[in-house]
Image (spheres, coloured by chain):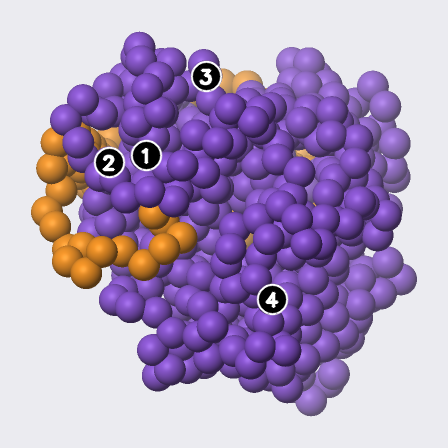
Chain colours: A orange, B purple
Amino acid sequence: MSIFNPPARWIEAPHGYERVWMGIALAWCVVLSVAMPYWHFTGKQTSAGEAYTVEPGQFDARVARFVAANQVDTRNGLPVVQPPPGGDIYLIGKSWQWYPILKLKKGIEYRLHTSSFDYQHGFSLLPMNMNFQVLPGYDHVITFTPAEAGEFNIICNEFCGAGHHVMTGLIIVEE
Amino acid sequence: MGNMKAERMRVCATTGLPVCLSAELFIKLNAVFGVVSLLIGAVAAILLALTRWEAVALLDPIDYYMVISLHGLNMLIFWILFMEMAILYFASTTLLNSRNFNNALSWGQFGLMLIGMVMVNYSVLAGRASVTMTSYVPLRAEQEFYLGMILFAVGALLGTANFFGGLYIAKRDKTYKGAIPLVVFGALAAAIIAVFTIVHGAIVLIPTWLWSLGVLENPPDAVWYRLIWWALGHCSQQINVCAMVAVWYFLATLTTGAKPLNQTVCRFAFLLYILFINLASAHHLLVDPAVSAGWKMWNTSYALYLAVMASMIHGFTVPASVEVAGRKKGIGGLFGWLTKAPWKDPGFSAFFLSLVIFGFGGGITGVTLGTHQINIIAHNTLRIPGHFHVTVAGGTTLAFMGLAYYVVPLIFRRDYSFKAFARLQPYIFGFGISLMAIGMTLAGSLGVPRRHPDIDFTGARVVADLGDAAPFLAMLGIGGVIAATGALIFVLLTVHAVFLGKSNKGRAMDSWQTPEQSKLTANLISTKWSPNEPGLKPKGTVVLTFIFLASFAVYYFANWKALIDVWPVK
């Protein structure tokens, strides 16, 4: 009985179906454990967490230099920035927008430096549903390759205060 | 009996177990405020469900953020921890034939937790702490919010200290023979996890409180805060799992006369929780900067998923023990033990639904979402609340509701009225919460974020088209309203029973089961028998667990398949 004291000699090895099930459960746990390193070396999607500490003001200044050097257009009052293919690109989360709009080339690998000017933010790229955490004080480097052309929205999916629900951004991918 | 003075104890008229009157008082106090928290949380839940249901869109964003803070804190922290305190009092006294350890300590536990709960609820309702449950820095709440959380945590720590003291005096006074019962062992595992959980809470909340006061100039570092906060946030859910599994064993015995097949195996599984669960805070940092892929994989796997194995063991042992008890009563067939189970006993139905919803819903989604790379397509989407509503609500909360259908008659000594509603209530809640979680999971798979009042981003400049998610958000809304209604029925029935229910002093409680069923169950509880007799093999459970494993594998590999469609990223 689970509510009474067990018999004096209660230690015994598992047996019968229970023992078989424990073996199966352990085997399944090994599968689950191996899957992640396997994907890490063979798959194309992972989160390496590459990051460098940075003061929010410093990062903001880097973004400003990046925008000044590469701006090609303005849309909805935001600069549209077209960096040289394959380079380092910058995106800052600020209450409450993603800045600037990025114009990228399909099939080219970019190193996206992203950080927050203020609160914690969530980089969520739609509609492919790709999500990364963006934190103040850390330059999070996300290396990615746009695989299709079109316009992709970024929303914020980490609660960041009163304007969280209007915090959006845009990535434009060209052929 | 035991170490209790005759005037400070009574013998339960239903079970014959001794009840320490001091412990009884604290069980009552904690249970009452647990139910008060559940009431606040359930009202908030209806408002949230009617907001995310796009066709209704009830609250404006600012109110939504306040109500979601209120809901999370009352449901995940206050309701659950008050109930767990009640369980610790019960496990260290009645089940050990012992008295409460120290009443002053118990008053400290209850008083601090009550003050903390009131402070936090005031702060949130006054609009001074709309920071959601995680309160990630540098978002800042007013100082009484953090102080309230700290006081609540210290109260809970005193409760665990009183529990350990209770174990000590029972052992010292030799109030029982041999090892402690399995349910007490489960409660002990929960209490041990609670200690290191609450210590992490203090480590993270004290500097945050000092910062909110202006004593510290800068907020804690964001990565540091997330790492330590989740050692509080995730491990505290594992206290729930432990307490829930202990309640499963308890209700299985009480409602069917079930006996664990192998005590060593059950206790070993609890031990695995204690050893490996603390790694789980990594589940929330899988797409974070500054923590490496290797760190993420090692921690999220709990060092070989041994905590997952523990749940899979309980997931076999608990239904197997119910099946074996059914076979011992002479019920044949592969699933006769299920079809002839006491489904009209809300203690049984709540427990068994909790087991199924937790396993098939919460367990499978939890492991999948917590897989390092798969988290990229899940982090902070509605898939996350879709997961934890079937662990902590469909699992733990439902199990605790089932417990209440026995605690109120046995401890408060009042029988429930309106029994037909009580018999129906676990099904209403279980169905609603499952429907809601499925809606959340499907909407989240399309990228719909959690903690958002709507999916048109309130007319923001660029608008992601998530219109396909509308039917799933309707499921969320309807399921949420049904679940919250189920919770409110539970609250009304329980409050009515506690204050106006028919007293059962001096007699056995009204049985939830037919006379035939309760006689057979009582017979199994009071006689000696072995669950390992030949002819009692749990064949039906084997079939169920293989269905479970197949569902698990399908969902898990389908998610890897979905990940392939995401842009190459590292």
Q: Kindly identify the amino acid type of the residue bearing the numbered disc 3.
A: Lys
| SS at badge 2 | loop
Q: Kindly identify the amino acid type of the residue bearing the numbered disc 2.
A: Pro
Q: On what subunit does the disc labeled 4 rest? A: B
Label 3: how many residues lie within 10 Å, few (<14), some (14-19) or many (20+)?
Answer: few
The numbered disc on residue B340 is 3
Q: Kindly identify the amino acid type of the residue bearing the numbered disc 4.
A: Arg
Q: Residue at 57% of width from left, 36% of height from top?
A: B347
| Quadrant showing the C terminus of chain B | top left
Instruction: From the top left corner, tell me how far across and down residue B518 is, in percent.
Output: 51, 32
| Whole-number angstrom distance, CA of label 3 to CA of label 4 | 35 Å
Question: According to the image, label 1 marks what residue?
Answer: B321
Q: Kindly identify the amino acid type of the residue bearing the numbered disc 1.
A: Ser
Question: According to the image, label 2 marks what residue?
Answer: B531
Q: On what subunit does the disc labeled 1 rest? A: B
Q: Residue at 74% of width from left, 58% of height from top?
A: B32
Disc on the earlier residue, 2 or 3: 3
Q: Residue at 46% of width from left, 79% of height from top?
A: B3
Which dot, 3 or 1, sits closer to the camera?
3
Q: Please, which residue is most extreme toward the top here?
A: B333
| Whole-number angstrom distance, CA of label 1 to CA of label 4 | 31 Å
Q: Left or right of B523: which side holds B38?
A: right
Figure check: B174 above or below B557: below
**Do dots 3 and 4 share one subunit?**
yes
Disc on the earlier residue, 1 or 4: 4
**Do dots 2 and 3 share one subunit?**
yes
